[in-house]
Image (cartoon, rainbow, N blue to C red):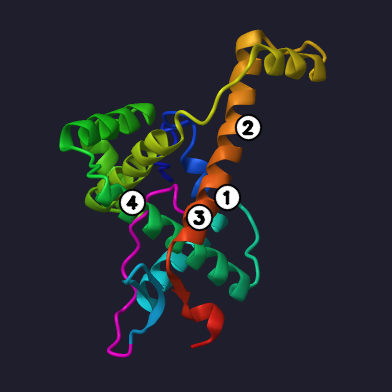
Amino acid sequence: MRISPFATLGALGLALCLGALPLTAVAQDFQPVQRQSLDRIVAVVNQQAIMHSQLEERMAQARSQLAAQGQSLPPESMLREYVLEQIILEEIQLQMAANAGLSVDDTALNRQMREIAESNNMTLDQFADALEADGLTMAAVREEIRREMLLRELHQRQLGGRVNVSTREVERFIEQQGGNVSHEQARQMVFQRKANEALDAWLQEIRADAFVDNRLASGS
């Protein structure tokens, strides 16, 4: 049985965070790629190294996720560049969260785990068994969800005040849809669009401000 741990996270908080991480939003614990003595650095983010073995593990996750969704794989080089860029963006954000003293306590994490299990009509024990049947572990899923929750908190703090929806924007959207949506639906859709735009702009800002040495791109 294929379990999607993030199916119930939906529009997290201000609906700002999951769209930024399309290949990391599903928590999966693949057996780590065998670390070899010649493991090398593929990128440096503000003095924090990203290793080739980390990239390979995330590449395996990306391939598995795309296959589970029935999507064809892009060229290997294109996928590798995309995945590495997502790791870089994630590392920048996690460093920002750490510097801001943000954290996710076990109580909140346990509550989220229960909600995910319940959304799959399971107890936590049943959920753990289902994950194991899919080759996953509860511990790895917990840490993946903790990370996503931490990024959500960071996004809320950084972007919460940037997104505002006016009455005129809602009315214009309703007109564009031919009056086929309610006022509340229109407000939510406009908010989601503006939130995604704000998130994209912010990610570009922090990416430009960070020191990043992408050695994969430079061929070093």
Q: Is residue 35 magenta?
A: yes
Residue drawn 22% across and 31% down? 108
Dot 2 crowding, Cα within 10 Å, few <14, some 14–19, many 20+: some
**Alpha-carbon span between mark 1 and mark 4:** 32 Å
**Amino acid type, callout 2:** Arg
The quarter holding residue 189 reads: top right
Residue drawn 23% across and 39% down? 104
Residue drawn 80% across and 14% down? 175
Number of disc labels: 4
**SS at mark 4 in the image:** helix
Q: Nearer the viewer, residue 62 or 186?
A: 186
**SS at mark 1 in the image:** loop
Q: Which mark is residue 65?
A: 3
4 or 3: tag closer to the N-terminus:
3
Dot 4 crowding, Cα within 10 Å, few <14, some 14–19, many 20+: some
Residue 5 pos. (x, y %)? 38, 41
Name the dominant secondary structure of the magenta segment. loop
Q: Which mark is residue 69?
A: 1
Frontmost of labels 4 and 2 is 4
**Alpha-carbon span between mark 2 and mark 1:** 24 Å
